[in-house]
Amino acid sequence: MLPARARRPALAALAFAAAAAAAGASSLATEPAEPRAPQRLSETGLYGPDGRLAATVERFVPQYPLWTDGARKSRFVQLPPGARIDVSDVDAWRFPTGTKVWKEFAWGERKVETRFIWKATDDGWVFATYVWNDAQTEAVLAPEAGLRNAHEIAPGKRHSIPAVDDCLACHGLAPSPVLGFSALQLSDDRDPLAPHAEPLPPGALTLRALVAQDRLRPRRPEWATTPPRIRERDPVARAALGYLSANCGGCHNDRGPLARLGLVLLHDVARDGERDAPEPARATAVGAAGRYVMPGLAPDDSRLVAPGDPGRSALLHRLGSRRPSSQMPPLGSVVADAEAVALVRAWIASLPVAHASR
Amino acid sequence: MSSRRTSAFVTAALAASAIAAHVTTAAPPEASATAADPVARGRYLVKVMVCNDCHTPWHMGPNGPEPDMSRELSGHPEGVAVTAPPALGGAWQWAGAGTNTAFAGPWGVSFTANLTPDPETGLGRWTPETFVAAIRSGRHEGQGRPILPPMPWPMYRNASDEDLRAIFAYLQSIPKVRNRVPQPIDPPAAN
Protein backbone atom coordinates (compact mmCIF):
# COMPACT_ATOMS: atom_id res chain seq x y z
CA MET A 1 0.00 0.00 0.00
CA LEU A 2 2.75 2.37 0.85
CA PRO A 3 4.85 2.09 -2.27
CA ALA A 4 1.95 2.73 -4.62
CA ARG A 5 0.82 5.83 -2.81
CA ALA A 6 4.22 7.06 -1.77
CA ARG A 7 4.68 8.24 -5.34
CA ARG A 8 2.32 11.10 -4.92
CA PRO A 9 4.16 13.17 -2.32
CA ALA A 10 7.20 13.73 -4.46
CA LEU A 11 4.98 14.59 -7.38
CA ALA A 12 2.89 16.89 -5.30
CA ALA A 13 5.92 18.75 -4.06
CA LEU A 14 7.03 19.11 -7.61
CA ALA A 15 3.71 20.48 -8.69
CA PHE A 16 3.67 22.98 -5.85
CA ALA A 17 7.30 24.00 -6.14
CA ALA A 18 6.80 25.22 -9.66
CA ALA A 19 4.05 27.69 -8.95
CA ALA A 20 3.38 28.12 -12.63
CA ALA A 21 3.09 24.40 -13.33
CA ALA A 22 -0.70 24.53 -12.95
CA ALA A 23 -2.53 22.12 -15.19
CA GLY A 24 0.43 20.18 -16.51
CA ALA A 25 1.15 18.65 -13.11
CA SER A 26 -1.37 15.84 -13.24
CA SER A 27 0.12 14.30 -16.34
CA LEU A 28 3.26 13.54 -14.38
CA ALA A 29 1.35 10.88 -12.50
CA THR A 30 2.01 8.55 -15.39
CA GLU A 31 5.79 8.86 -15.22
CA PRO A 32 7.56 5.63 -14.37
CA ALA A 33 9.65 4.56 -11.36
CA GLU A 34 9.26 7.24 -8.73
CA PRO A 35 12.05 7.04 -6.19
CA ARG A 36 10.92 5.95 -2.72
CA ALA A 37 12.17 6.49 0.76
CA PRO A 38 14.04 3.45 2.13
CA GLN A 39 12.38 1.35 4.84
CA ARG A 40 14.94 2.18 7.53
CA LEU A 41 16.67 5.34 8.62
CA SER A 42 20.00 3.51 8.54
CA GLU A 43 19.52 3.09 4.78
CA THR A 44 19.13 6.80 4.07
CA GLY A 45 22.83 7.62 4.35
CA LEU A 46 22.64 9.54 7.62
CA TYR A 47 24.99 7.18 9.44
CA GLY A 48 28.20 5.46 8.48
CA PRO A 49 28.88 1.75 9.01
CA ASP A 50 30.09 2.49 12.55
CA GLY A 51 26.68 3.93 13.44
CA ARG A 52 28.10 7.46 13.76
CA LEU A 53 27.07 10.36 11.53
CA ALA A 54 28.32 9.77 8.00
CA ALA A 55 31.43 11.82 7.17
CA THR A 56 29.63 13.66 4.36
CA VAL A 57 26.76 14.77 6.61
CA GLU A 58 26.90 18.25 8.18
CA ARG A 59 24.92 19.90 10.94
CA PHE A 60 22.99 23.17 10.73
CA VAL A 61 20.77 25.09 13.13
CA PRO A 62 18.13 27.54 11.89
CA GLN A 63 18.23 30.65 14.07
CA TYR A 64 14.43 30.65 14.46
CA PRO A 65 13.35 27.06 15.12
CA LEU A 66 9.85 25.71 14.52
CA TRP A 67 7.94 25.14 17.77
CA THR A 68 7.05 21.46 18.18
CA ASP A 69 5.83 21.17 21.76
CA GLY A 70 9.29 21.57 23.22
CA ALA A 71 10.98 18.85 21.16
CA ARG A 72 14.77 18.88 21.07
CA LYS A 73 15.86 18.92 17.46
CA SER A 74 19.01 18.09 15.53
CA ARG A 75 19.34 18.79 11.83
CA PHE A 76 21.65 17.31 9.24
CA VAL A 77 22.29 18.00 5.58
CA GLN A 78 24.17 16.19 2.85
CA LEU A 79 24.91 18.15 -0.30
CA PRO A 80 26.27 16.18 -3.25
CA PRO A 81 30.05 16.63 -3.37
CA GLY A 82 31.10 19.61 -5.48
CA ALA A 83 27.51 20.63 -6.25
CA ARG A 84 26.37 24.16 -5.49
CA ILE A 85 23.11 25.62 -4.29
CA ASP A 86 21.45 27.93 -6.81
CA VAL A 87 20.68 31.07 -4.82
CA SER A 88 19.90 33.31 -7.76
CA ASP A 89 16.47 33.72 -6.19
CA VAL A 90 17.63 34.65 -2.70
CA ASP A 91 14.27 33.72 -1.19
CA ALA A 92 13.84 30.36 -2.94
CA TRP A 93 17.04 28.39 -2.93
CA ARG A 94 17.27 25.57 -5.44
CA PHE A 95 19.15 22.56 -4.21
CA PRO A 96 21.24 20.20 -6.30
CA THR A 97 19.69 16.84 -7.12
CA GLY A 98 20.73 14.34 -4.49
CA THR A 99 20.45 16.79 -1.56
CA LYS A 100 19.27 15.08 1.64
CA VAL A 101 18.13 16.80 4.82
CA TRP A 102 17.16 15.16 8.14
CA LYS A 103 15.62 16.46 11.34
CA GLU A 104 15.64 14.40 14.52
CA PHE A 105 12.98 14.99 17.21
CA ALA A 106 13.57 14.01 20.83
CA TRP A 107 11.72 14.67 24.05
CA GLY A 108 14.14 14.48 26.93
CA GLU A 109 16.66 11.85 25.93
CA ARG A 110 14.09 9.80 23.98
CA LYS A 111 14.46 10.04 20.20
CA VAL A 112 10.95 9.82 18.71
CA GLU A 113 11.19 10.43 14.97
CA THR A 114 13.66 11.53 12.32
CA ARG A 115 12.16 13.35 9.35
CA PHE A 116 13.80 13.12 5.95
CA ILE A 117 13.50 15.06 2.74
CA TRP A 118 15.46 14.10 -0.33
CA LYS A 119 15.73 15.73 -3.72
CA ALA A 120 15.75 12.40 -5.51
CA THR A 121 15.21 13.69 -9.04
CA ASP A 122 15.74 17.00 -10.78
CA ASP A 123 12.26 18.16 -9.94
CA GLY A 124 10.88 15.99 -7.16
CA TRP A 125 11.36 15.74 -3.41
CA VAL A 126 10.62 12.65 -1.34
CA PHE A 127 9.14 13.28 2.13
CA ALA A 128 9.30 10.60 4.82
CA THR A 129 9.66 10.15 8.55
CA TYR A 130 11.18 7.34 10.61
CA VAL A 131 9.94 6.27 14.02
CA TRP A 132 12.56 5.25 16.60
CA ASN A 133 12.30 1.92 18.41
CA ASP A 134 12.34 1.71 22.20
CA ALA A 135 15.92 0.46 22.19
CA GLN A 136 16.84 3.62 20.24
CA THR A 137 18.89 1.55 17.82
CA GLU A 138 16.89 2.00 14.60
CA ALA A 139 14.03 3.98 13.16
CA VAL A 140 11.52 2.56 10.69
CA LEU A 141 9.60 4.32 7.92
CA ALA A 142 6.25 5.58 9.25
CA PRO A 143 3.02 4.83 7.37
CA GLU A 144 2.07 7.44 4.81
CA ALA A 145 -0.93 8.36 6.97
CA GLY A 146 1.31 9.02 10.00
CA LEU A 147 0.77 7.70 13.52
CA ARG A 148 -1.64 9.50 15.78
CA ASN A 149 -0.72 10.08 19.43
CA ALA A 150 2.51 8.15 19.09
CA HIS A 151 4.38 9.56 22.06
CA GLU A 152 3.36 11.20 25.34
CA ILE A 153 5.12 14.54 25.76
CA ALA A 154 3.23 15.94 28.76
CA PRO A 155 0.39 14.61 30.91
CA GLY A 156 -2.55 14.07 28.55
CA LYS A 157 -0.66 15.52 25.57
CA ARG A 158 0.67 13.27 22.86
CA HIS A 159 2.82 13.91 19.83
CA SER A 160 1.54 12.59 16.49
CA ILE A 161 3.87 11.48 13.71
CA PRO A 162 2.74 13.58 10.74
CA ALA A 163 1.25 12.10 7.60
CA VAL A 164 3.07 12.82 4.35
CA ASP A 165 0.21 15.17 3.45
CA ASP A 166 0.99 17.05 6.66
CA CYS A 167 4.62 17.46 5.61
CA LEU A 168 3.34 18.92 2.37
CA ALA A 169 0.95 21.31 4.09
CA CYS A 170 3.99 23.06 5.61
CA HIS A 171 6.80 22.28 3.14
CA GLY A 172 5.04 21.70 -0.17
CA LEU A 173 3.70 25.15 -0.92
CA ALA A 174 6.58 27.29 0.34
CA PRO A 175 8.94 29.10 -2.07
CA SER A 176 11.50 26.36 -1.36
CA PRO A 177 10.51 23.00 0.14
CA VAL A 178 13.51 23.30 2.47
CA LEU A 179 12.35 25.69 5.19
CA GLY A 180 15.16 26.02 7.70
CA PHE A 181 18.20 26.03 5.42
CA SER A 182 17.76 29.52 4.01
CA ALA A 183 19.56 32.86 4.00
CA LEU A 184 17.79 34.28 7.06
CA GLN A 185 17.83 31.02 8.99
CA LEU A 186 21.56 30.40 8.44
CA SER A 187 22.58 34.04 8.83
CA ASP A 188 25.56 34.59 11.12
CA ASP A 189 23.85 37.67 12.56
CA ARG A 190 21.88 35.44 14.93
CA ASP A 191 19.02 36.88 16.93
CA PRO A 192 19.77 36.73 20.67
CA LEU A 193 16.04 36.91 21.52
CA ALA A 194 14.87 34.15 19.17
CA PRO A 195 12.52 31.86 21.14
CA HIS A 196 13.97 28.41 21.85
CA ALA A 197 17.20 29.30 20.05
CA GLU A 198 19.58 26.39 19.92
CA PRO A 199 23.34 26.74 20.30
CA LEU A 200 25.49 26.21 17.21
CA PRO A 201 27.46 22.98 17.50
CA PRO A 202 31.11 23.20 16.36
CA GLY A 203 31.44 23.00 12.59
CA ALA A 204 27.75 23.69 11.93
CA LEU A 205 27.09 25.18 8.52
CA THR A 206 26.21 28.86 8.49
CA LEU A 207 25.82 31.33 5.67
CA ARG A 208 29.39 32.58 6.10
CA ALA A 209 30.73 29.03 5.84
CA LEU A 210 28.69 28.41 2.68
CA VAL A 211 30.13 31.57 1.14
CA ALA A 212 33.68 30.80 2.29
CA GLN A 213 33.48 27.26 0.92
CA ASP A 214 32.13 28.61 -2.39
CA ARG A 215 29.01 26.47 -2.24
CA LEU A 216 26.54 29.07 -3.52
CA ARG A 217 25.81 30.28 -7.05
CA PRO A 218 26.00 33.17 -7.49
CA ARG A 219 28.63 33.50 -4.77
CA ARG A 220 26.93 36.21 -2.67
CA PRO A 221 30.04 37.48 -0.81
CA GLU A 222 27.88 40.24 0.68
CA TRP A 223 26.20 37.63 2.89
CA ALA A 224 29.50 37.13 4.71
CA THR A 225 29.91 40.85 5.43
CA THR A 226 26.28 42.00 5.90
CA PRO A 227 24.36 38.85 6.82
CA PRO A 228 20.57 38.95 6.35
CA ARG A 229 18.45 39.95 9.32
CA ILE A 230 14.91 41.03 10.12
CA ARG A 231 14.60 44.71 9.20
CA GLU A 232 13.49 45.96 12.62
CA ARG A 233 15.59 48.09 14.97
CA ASP A 234 13.73 47.18 18.14
CA PRO A 235 15.04 43.82 19.42
CA VAL A 236 11.59 42.60 20.48
CA ALA A 237 10.10 43.41 17.08
CA ARG A 238 13.03 41.71 15.38
CA ALA A 239 12.59 38.49 17.36
CA ALA A 240 8.79 38.49 17.03
CA LEU A 241 8.86 38.91 13.25
CA GLY A 242 11.71 36.40 12.90
CA TYR A 243 9.65 33.87 14.82
CA LEU A 244 6.59 34.50 12.63
CA SER A 245 8.67 34.28 9.46
CA ALA A 246 10.01 30.84 10.42
CA ASN A 247 6.92 29.36 12.05
CA CYS A 248 4.26 30.81 9.78
CA GLY A 249 5.94 32.09 6.61
CA GLY A 250 6.10 28.70 4.86
CA CYS A 251 2.34 29.02 4.39
CA HIS A 252 1.84 32.76 4.80
CA ASN A 253 3.93 34.16 1.96
CA ASP A 254 3.19 35.98 -1.26
CA ARG A 255 4.17 33.19 -3.65
CA GLY A 256 2.15 30.19 -2.55
CA PRO A 257 -1.60 29.65 -2.73
CA LEU A 258 -2.24 31.41 0.60
CA ALA A 259 -1.08 34.66 -1.00
CA ARG A 260 -4.80 35.11 -1.57
CA LEU A 261 -5.19 35.90 2.15
CA GLY A 262 -2.91 38.92 1.80
CA LEU A 263 -1.15 38.07 5.08
CA VAL A 264 2.59 37.79 4.38
CA LEU A 265 4.71 36.71 7.33
CA LEU A 266 7.76 35.39 5.45
CA HIS A 267 10.81 37.65 5.56
CA ASP A 268 12.02 38.67 2.09
CA VAL A 269 15.80 38.71 1.82
CA ALA A 270 15.43 40.25 -1.64
CA ARG A 271 14.49 43.59 -0.09
CA ASP A 272 17.20 43.62 2.58
CA GLY A 273 19.29 46.09 0.58
CA GLU A 274 16.42 48.53 0.14
CA ARG A 275 16.36 51.52 2.41
CA ASP A 276 13.39 51.46 4.79
CA ALA A 277 11.72 48.48 3.15
CA PRO A 278 9.13 47.36 5.73
CA GLU A 279 9.03 43.78 6.94
CA PRO A 280 6.17 42.04 5.06
CA ALA A 281 4.50 41.16 8.38
CA ARG A 282 4.44 44.80 9.43
CA ALA A 283 3.09 45.88 6.07
CA THR A 284 0.36 43.25 5.77
CA ALA A 285 -0.74 42.44 9.34
CA VAL A 286 -0.58 45.65 11.34
CA GLY A 287 -3.97 47.35 11.26
CA ALA A 288 -5.35 44.94 8.65
CA ALA A 289 -8.87 43.59 9.09
CA GLY A 290 -8.29 40.03 7.88
CA ARG A 291 -10.99 37.53 7.17
CA TYR A 292 -11.01 35.66 10.47
CA VAL A 293 -12.99 37.40 13.18
CA MET A 294 -11.84 37.14 16.79
CA PRO A 295 -14.40 35.20 18.84
CA GLY A 296 -16.55 37.65 20.79
CA LEU A 297 -15.66 40.67 18.64
CA ALA A 298 -17.64 42.46 15.97
CA PRO A 299 -15.99 42.12 12.55
CA ASP A 300 -15.16 45.82 12.60
CA ASP A 301 -13.24 45.51 15.86
CA SER A 302 -11.14 42.50 14.96
CA ARG A 303 -7.70 43.08 13.42
CA LEU A 304 -4.93 40.70 12.41
CA VAL A 305 -2.64 42.87 14.52
CA ALA A 306 -4.29 45.78 16.35
CA PRO A 307 -1.45 48.16 17.25
CA GLY A 308 -1.14 48.56 21.00
CA ASP A 309 -4.08 46.20 21.56
CA PRO A 310 -3.18 42.51 21.86
CA GLY A 311 -6.79 41.71 22.87
CA ARG A 312 -8.10 42.62 19.43
CA SER A 313 -5.30 40.90 17.50
CA ALA A 314 -6.47 37.75 15.73
CA LEU A 315 -2.91 36.74 14.88
CA LEU A 316 -1.98 36.58 18.56
CA HIS A 317 -5.22 34.81 19.41
CA ARG A 318 -4.57 32.10 16.83
CA LEU A 319 -0.93 31.71 17.84
CA GLY A 320 -2.03 31.08 21.42
CA SER A 321 -5.02 28.87 20.65
CA ARG A 322 -5.10 25.11 20.35
CA ARG A 323 -8.77 24.95 19.52
CA PRO A 324 -8.99 23.11 16.23
CA SER A 325 -10.88 25.87 14.43
CA SER A 326 -8.44 28.61 15.31
CA GLN A 327 -4.99 27.25 16.18
CA MET A 328 -2.00 28.46 14.17
CA PRO A 329 -0.06 26.78 12.77
CA PRO A 330 -3.03 24.55 12.04
CA LEU A 331 -1.03 21.38 12.60
CA GLY A 332 2.19 20.08 14.08
CA SER A 333 1.79 20.93 17.77
CA VAL A 334 -0.70 20.29 20.55
CA VAL A 335 0.58 22.83 23.09
CA ALA A 336 0.76 26.57 22.41
CA ASP A 337 4.20 28.19 22.49
CA ALA A 338 3.95 30.33 25.64
CA GLU A 339 7.30 32.03 25.07
CA ALA A 340 6.30 33.07 21.55
CA VAL A 341 2.88 34.25 22.72
CA ALA A 342 4.56 36.49 25.30
CA LEU A 343 7.02 37.82 22.72
CA VAL A 344 4.39 38.59 20.06
CA ARG A 345 2.11 40.12 22.70
CA ALA A 346 4.95 42.42 23.79
CA TRP A 347 5.58 43.42 20.19
CA ILE A 348 1.90 44.21 19.54
CA ALA A 349 1.62 46.12 22.81
CA SER A 350 4.63 48.22 21.81
CA LEU A 351 3.14 49.31 18.47
CA PRO A 352 1.95 52.93 18.44
CA VAL A 353 -1.84 53.08 18.42
CA ALA A 354 -1.69 55.93 15.91
CA HIS A 355 -1.00 53.41 13.16
CA ALA A 356 -4.44 51.92 13.59
CA SER A 357 -6.46 52.09 10.42
CA ARG A 358 -10.03 51.88 11.61
CA MET B 1 -40.95 8.67 -7.46
CA SER B 2 -41.00 11.57 -5.11
CA SER B 3 -37.66 12.69 -6.43
CA ARG B 4 -39.16 12.70 -9.89
CA ARG B 5 -41.92 14.99 -8.71
CA THR B 6 -39.42 17.24 -7.03
CA SER B 7 -37.38 17.41 -10.16
CA ALA B 8 -40.35 18.16 -12.30
CA PHE B 9 -41.25 21.01 -10.02
CA VAL B 10 -37.80 22.50 -9.99
CA THR B 11 -37.50 22.11 -13.70
CA ALA B 12 -40.77 23.92 -14.21
CA ALA B 13 -39.89 26.67 -11.79
CA LEU B 14 -36.52 27.30 -13.35
CA ALA B 15 -37.39 26.37 -16.88
CA ALA B 16 -35.41 29.20 -18.38
CA SER B 17 -32.28 28.40 -16.48
CA ALA B 18 -29.62 25.95 -17.46
CA ILE B 19 -29.05 25.02 -13.82
CA ALA B 20 -32.35 23.19 -13.73
CA ALA B 21 -30.57 20.27 -15.30
CA HIS B 22 -28.80 19.57 -12.05
CA VAL B 23 -31.74 18.00 -10.36
CA THR B 24 -33.71 16.68 -13.26
CA THR B 25 -33.94 12.92 -13.46
CA ALA B 26 -35.82 12.85 -16.73
CA ALA B 27 -32.73 13.31 -18.85
CA PRO B 28 -29.99 10.89 -17.81
CA PRO B 29 -26.79 12.64 -16.80
CA GLU B 30 -24.20 12.86 -19.51
CA ALA B 31 -22.26 9.91 -18.18
CA SER B 32 -20.12 9.92 -21.25
CA ALA B 33 -18.78 13.40 -20.56
CA THR B 34 -15.04 13.03 -20.59
CA ALA B 35 -11.94 14.98 -19.95
CA ALA B 36 -12.34 16.49 -23.38
CA ASP B 37 -14.80 18.87 -21.75
CA PRO B 38 -13.83 19.20 -18.10
CA VAL B 39 -16.77 21.47 -17.26
CA ALA B 40 -19.30 18.95 -18.59
CA ARG B 41 -17.47 16.13 -16.82
CA GLY B 42 -17.44 18.21 -13.63
CA ARG B 43 -21.16 18.95 -13.89
CA TYR B 44 -21.82 15.24 -14.17
CA LEU B 45 -19.58 14.40 -11.21
CA VAL B 46 -21.09 17.10 -9.00
CA LYS B 47 -24.49 15.64 -9.75
CA VAL B 48 -23.69 12.03 -8.99
CA MET B 49 -21.44 12.80 -6.02
CA VAL B 50 -24.40 14.64 -4.44
CA CYS B 51 -22.61 17.87 -3.58
CA ASN B 52 -26.00 19.60 -3.78
CA ASP B 53 -27.38 17.56 -0.91
CA CYS B 54 -25.23 19.48 1.55
CA HIS B 55 -23.95 22.56 -0.25
CA THR B 56 -27.28 23.84 -1.63
CA PRO B 57 -29.62 24.99 1.14
CA TRP B 58 -32.87 23.06 1.31
CA HIS B 59 -36.22 24.71 1.75
CA MET B 60 -39.77 23.50 2.02
CA GLY B 61 -41.40 23.33 -1.39
CA PRO B 62 -45.00 22.41 -2.16
CA ASN B 63 -43.91 18.80 -2.40
CA GLY B 64 -41.68 18.67 0.66
CA PRO B 65 -38.04 19.52 1.29
CA GLU B 66 -35.91 20.24 -1.77
CA PRO B 67 -32.68 22.03 -2.57
CA ASP B 68 -33.21 25.71 -3.34
CA MET B 69 -31.51 25.83 -6.73
CA SER B 70 -31.60 29.61 -6.83
CA ARG B 71 -28.85 29.33 -4.23
CA GLU B 72 -27.07 26.48 -5.91
CA LEU B 73 -23.96 25.29 -4.05
CA SER B 74 -23.70 28.53 -2.09
CA GLY B 75 -23.37 26.76 1.28
CA HIS B 76 -24.96 27.48 4.62
CA PRO B 77 -26.96 30.73 4.24
CA GLU B 78 -25.40 33.50 6.31
CA GLY B 79 -28.85 34.70 7.37
CA VAL B 80 -29.82 31.40 8.98
CA ALA B 81 -28.46 31.66 12.52
CA VAL B 82 -27.47 28.38 14.09
CA THR B 83 -26.55 28.69 17.72
CA ALA B 84 -26.25 25.99 20.36
CA PRO B 85 -26.61 22.47 18.99
CA PRO B 86 -29.58 20.36 20.14
CA ALA B 87 -29.09 17.98 23.07
CA LEU B 88 -27.82 14.69 21.68
CA GLY B 89 -27.18 11.35 23.29
CA GLY B 90 -27.65 7.61 23.12
CA ALA B 91 -28.06 6.52 19.51
CA TRP B 92 -28.46 10.14 18.33
CA GLN B 93 -24.91 11.41 17.96
CA TRP B 94 -25.37 14.10 15.36
CA ALA B 95 -28.04 16.32 13.88
CA GLY B 96 -28.58 18.38 10.76
CA ALA B 97 -30.36 21.68 10.25
CA GLY B 98 -33.43 21.88 8.01
CA THR B 99 -31.32 23.54 5.34
CA ASN B 100 -29.05 20.46 5.41
CA THR B 101 -26.15 22.91 5.52
CA ALA B 102 -25.33 22.89 9.25
CA PHE B 103 -24.41 19.80 11.22
CA ALA B 104 -23.90 19.34 14.96
CA GLY B 105 -21.97 16.45 16.42
CA PRO B 106 -18.90 15.55 18.46
CA TRP B 107 -16.92 17.88 16.15
CA GLY B 108 -18.94 20.93 17.18
CA VAL B 109 -21.04 22.60 14.49
CA SER B 110 -19.92 22.59 10.84
CA PHE B 111 -21.38 24.70 8.07
CA THR B 112 -21.11 23.75 4.41
CA ALA B 113 -18.86 25.94 2.33
CA ASN B 114 -19.85 28.30 -0.46
CA LEU B 115 -18.60 26.48 -3.56
CA THR B 116 -19.52 29.24 -6.04
CA PRO B 117 -16.75 31.36 -7.60
CA ASP B 118 -17.47 34.45 -5.50
CA PRO B 119 -13.98 35.79 -4.67
CA GLU B 120 -14.79 37.07 -1.17
CA THR B 121 -17.04 34.34 0.19
CA GLY B 122 -16.65 31.39 -2.19
CA LEU B 123 -13.90 29.58 -4.05
CA GLY B 124 -13.14 32.47 -6.43
CA ARG B 125 -9.54 32.82 -5.27
CA TRP B 126 -8.81 29.11 -5.17
CA THR B 127 -6.64 27.45 -7.77
CA PRO B 128 -7.21 23.89 -9.01
CA GLU B 129 -4.23 22.90 -6.80
CA THR B 130 -5.94 24.33 -3.70
CA PHE B 131 -9.04 22.30 -4.43
CA VAL B 132 -7.13 19.07 -5.08
CA ALA B 133 -5.04 19.62 -1.93
CA ALA B 134 -8.16 20.25 0.19
CA ILE B 135 -9.92 17.09 -0.99
CA ARG B 136 -6.81 14.92 -0.80
CA SER B 137 -5.44 16.09 2.53
CA GLY B 138 -8.77 16.87 4.22
CA ARG B 139 -7.34 20.22 5.26
CA HIS B 140 -9.27 23.48 5.16
CA GLU B 141 -8.09 25.50 2.14
CA GLY B 142 -5.68 22.65 1.40
CA GLN B 143 -3.32 23.62 4.23
CA GLY B 144 -5.33 24.51 7.32
CA ARG B 145 -7.37 22.81 10.07
CA PRO B 146 -8.95 19.41 9.43
CA ILE B 147 -12.12 19.61 7.33
CA LEU B 148 -15.02 18.61 9.54
CA PRO B 149 -17.71 15.96 9.05
CA PRO B 150 -19.89 15.21 7.30
CA MET B 151 -17.88 16.47 4.28
CA PRO B 152 -17.02 13.12 2.65
CA TRP B 153 -13.45 13.99 1.67
CA PRO B 154 -12.12 10.61 2.91
CA MET B 155 -14.10 9.05 0.05
CA TYR B 156 -13.67 11.83 -2.50
CA ARG B 157 -9.90 11.73 -2.07
CA ASN B 158 -9.96 8.50 -4.05
CA ALA B 159 -11.04 10.40 -7.18
CA SER B 160 -8.43 10.94 -9.88
CA ASP B 161 -6.67 14.27 -10.24
CA GLU B 162 -8.44 14.66 -13.56
CA ASP B 163 -11.89 14.24 -12.02
CA LEU B 164 -11.11 16.57 -9.13
CA ARG B 165 -9.90 19.20 -11.57
CA ALA B 166 -13.05 18.73 -13.64
CA ILE B 167 -15.23 19.23 -10.55
CA PHE B 168 -13.33 22.40 -9.77
CA ALA B 169 -13.63 23.63 -13.37
CA TYR B 170 -17.38 23.17 -13.18
CA LEU B 171 -17.64 24.87 -9.77
CA GLN B 172 -15.79 27.87 -11.21
CA SER B 173 -18.33 28.06 -14.05
CA ILE B 174 -21.52 28.36 -11.98
CA PRO B 175 -23.06 31.71 -10.97
CA LYS B 176 -21.35 33.57 -8.15
CA VAL B 177 -23.38 33.80 -4.97
CA ARG B 178 -22.21 36.20 -2.28
CA ASN B 179 -22.80 34.33 0.98
CA ARG B 180 -20.40 34.45 3.92
CA VAL B 181 -20.62 31.08 5.66
CA PRO B 182 -19.95 31.29 9.43
CA GLN B 183 -16.80 29.86 11.02
CA PRO B 184 -17.39 26.43 12.58
CA ILE B 185 -18.27 26.27 16.28
CA ASP B 186 -15.82 24.28 18.40
CA PRO B 187 -17.08 21.45 20.60
CA PRO B 188 -17.29 22.47 24.27
CA ALA B 189 -14.53 20.01 25.20
CA ALA B 190 -11.84 21.67 23.07
CA ASN B 191 -9.30 23.67 25.08
Image: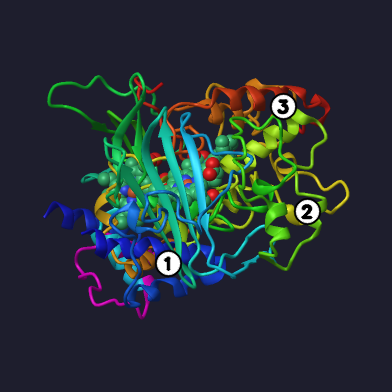
Q: Main secondary structure of the magenta part?
A: loop
**Numbered circle sitting on residue A347:** 3
Q: Nearer the viewer, residue B41 or A238?
A: A238
Q: Amino acid at mark 1?
A: Ala
Which of pointers 2 and 3 lies earlier in the amino acid sequence?
2
Give the residue furthest to the right.
A275
Q: Amino acid at mark 2?
A: Ala
Which quarter of the figure has residue A304?
A: top right
Question: Which region is colored magenta?
Answer: B16-39
> For mark 2, what is the residue?
A224
Determine whether, in the image, residue B177 is placed left or right of residue A33: right
Picture residue at 20% right of the left edge, 63% below the top: B25
**Helix, strand or loop status at disc 2:** helix
Quadrant of the rendering where the C terminus of chain A is positioned? top right
Question: Whole-Å distance between the Cαs marked 2 and 3?
Answer: 29 Å
Residue B20 located within the stretch drawn in magenta: yes
Nearer mark to the viewer, of 3 and 1: 3
Residue B82 pos. (x, y %): 38, 28
Residue B77 pos. (x, y %): 42, 40
**Helix, strand or loop status at disc 1:** helix
Question: Whole-Å distance between the Cαs marked 3 and 1?
Answer: 43 Å
Q: Chain of mark 1?
A: B
Q: Is residue B19 above or below residue B140?
A: below
**Numbered circle sitting on residue B169:** 1
Residue B15 appears in the picture as rendered = no
Picture residue at 77% right of the left edge, 55% below the top: A223
Nearer mark to the viewer, of 2 and 1: 2
Badges 3 and 1, same chain:
no
Residue B147 pos. (x, y %): 36, 43
Residue A307 appears in the picture as rendered = yes
**Helix, strand or loop status at disc 3:** helix
